[in-house]
Amino acid sequence: MRRLLAIAPALVLAACSLPRHPPPAPTLQVPAQWRTDIGPGSPVERDWWRAFHDPALADLVRQALARNGDIRTAQARLQEYRARITVARSVESPQLNASFSPGRARVIGPFGTPIDVTSITGGVQASYEIDVSGRSAAAIEAARLDYASQQAAADATALSVAANTASGYLTLRGLDAQLELARATLVTRQRSLDLARREFEVGYSSRLELAQAESEFRATSAVVPQLERSITLQEDALAVLTGASPGPVARGLPLGELAPPMIATLLPSELLRRRPDVAAAERAVAAADAALAAARDQLLPSFNLAASITPYANSVSQLLNSPFTLWSVGGSVLAPIFNGGRLRAQTDIAASARDRAVIAYESAVRSAFADTENALASIRFLGRQLAEGEARRVAAAEALRIARNRHANGYASYLEELDAQRALYSVENAQLQLRAGLLGAHVDLYRALGGGWLPPAK
C-alpha cells in the first residue's frame, strides 16, 4: 500500500498528460434536395434488377452474386475480421498456462563427489489484467466496428458487381441491336449496289454513282465484324463478372422491349443511410476513433494479477504421491515512464488514421451525391435526347422515301438516295445507343441509391 501511495502521483501525472487529438473540422454540406427531378416512381427493391423483367438478366446477376471473385474475397475477409474480434476479447479473460519440465543433471555434492539429480516440475500459471482505463474495451469496440465496416464494404462490393453485370448485359443487348441493324442495312446496301451496277451497265448512271454505292456497301460491311468483336469482348467481360469461362451469354428480351420503371429518389439526407459504401466509411471512422482511444490508454498504468502453483518432485512416483508444492500470488502495477516516445508516436499514428477515415467518409458522401445527381441528369436528358432522336428518325425515313421516289422517277441521281440511306442508318444507330445508354443510366441510379440496401438491425 505504501508503494502504491508512493507511485500514485506519477500515475495521476501520466493520466493528466494524455495527448489530445481533436478530429478535423467538418467540411461536408448536405444539400436539401437534388438538382434534377425525374418525377414520381416506385421505391427501390433489394433485388432491383428484376424490375427490368428480363429472366436472362436476373439469372446473370444471380450467378455473379454467387460466383464473382471480388464478392468471395470480401466474404473471406469477413472471416478474418470476425477472428480479430475474438482476439480482442481474449484480453478480458484470464490467461491460463500449464507447464511440465522433467530434467536430469549431475552436480557436485558437499564432499566433492558427483551426484545425479532428477527433477520433475509441473505447474499452472494464471494472470489477469484489470481493465481500469477501458483500453481493452476500446480495442474490442474497434475490432467490432472494423468488422461492421467490412460487412458494409462486402455489401457495397455485391452492389457494384450486380450493377456492373446489369450494365454489361444492357450494353450487350445494345450491341446486339446495332449488329442486327447493320446486317439489315447491309442487305439494303447490297441491293443498292446491284441496282447501281445494272444502271451503270445500261448507261443510265455514271461510274461515280456505282463507286459511291460500293463504298457505302463496304463501309457497312466493315461495321459488322467490328460489332461482332465488341459483342465477343462484352460476353467475355460478363463471363468474368459471373465467375464463368469466356463464352456465349444467354439473351432475354431484345433492347426495344426493355423498359425499366421509374425510380423514386431519396432525399440527400436519406441517401446517407441507404448506401453500403457510405456506411462502411462511417463505421471505419468509428473504428478508427475507438482504436485511437485504445492507443491513448496505452499511456495509462496497467494493473495485473498473477497466481501460480508448481508441484516439484525427484521422481514420477513422488510427483504423483507427495510432491513439494510451490505457489505464488501477487499483483503488479505497470506505468510507462520513458519509452523513447514510442507510445505517443503510436497515438499520433492512430490519430492520423482517424483523421484519414473522417476525410474518406466525407469523400464517400460527396461521391454518393455526385453519383445520384449524374444518374438523375442522365435519365432526364437522355430521355429528352431519345425523344428528339425519334422525331429525327421519322424525318430521315421520310427523306429516304422521297429520295427513292425521286430517283425512281428520274428527278434525282442515285447519290441523293445514298445520302438519305446513310443519314437514316446513322440516326437509327444513334437511337439504339441512346436507348442502351438510358437503360444504363437507370442501373446507375439504382447503384447510386444503394440498390435497396438497408443497414442490418442492431
Image (cartoon, rainbow, N blue to C red):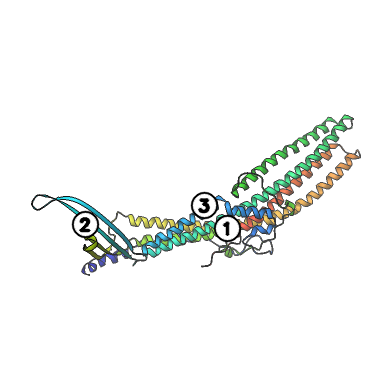
Report the mark closest to the observer, 2 or 1.
2
As shown in the figure, which amino acid type bears the numbered disc 2?
Ser
Location of residue 182 in the rendering, given as x and y in whole percent from the top left corner: 75, 42
Q: Which residue ends up furthest to the left in the rendered image?
A: 111
Quadrant (top left, top right, bottom left, bottom right) of the N terminus: bottom left
Residue at 63% x, 48% y is 238
| The one of 402 and 124 positioned closer to us in this rendering | 124
Cα separation, mark 2 vs mark 3, equals: 55 Å
Secondary structure category for the residue under label 3: helix
Secondary structure category for the residue under label 2: loop
Report the mark closest to the observer, 3 or 1.
3
Asked whether disc 2 touches disc 3, contact meaning CB atoms under 8 Å apart, the reply is no
As shown in the figure, which amino acid type bears the numbered disc 3?
Thr
Cα separation, mark 3 vs mark 1, equals: 24 Å
Dot 2 corresponds to which residue?
Answer: 315
Secondary structure category for the residue under label 1: helix
Location of residue 99 in the rendering, given as x and y in whole percent from the top left corner: 28, 57
Local packing at callout 1 (Cα closer than 10 Å; few below 14, some 14-19, many 20+) is many
Dot 3 corresponds to which residue?
Answer: 73
As shown in the figure, which amino acid type bears the numbered disc 1?
Ala
- Return the disc, 2 or 3, that comes first in the chain's sequence: 3
Residue 89 located left or right of residue 254: left
Looking at the rendered structure, which numbered label has been put on residue 368? 1
Residue 337 located left or right of residue 442: left
Location of residue 339 in the rendering, given as x and y in whole percent from the top left corner: 29, 55
Location of residue 387 in the rendering, given as x and y in whole percent from the top left corner: 75, 54
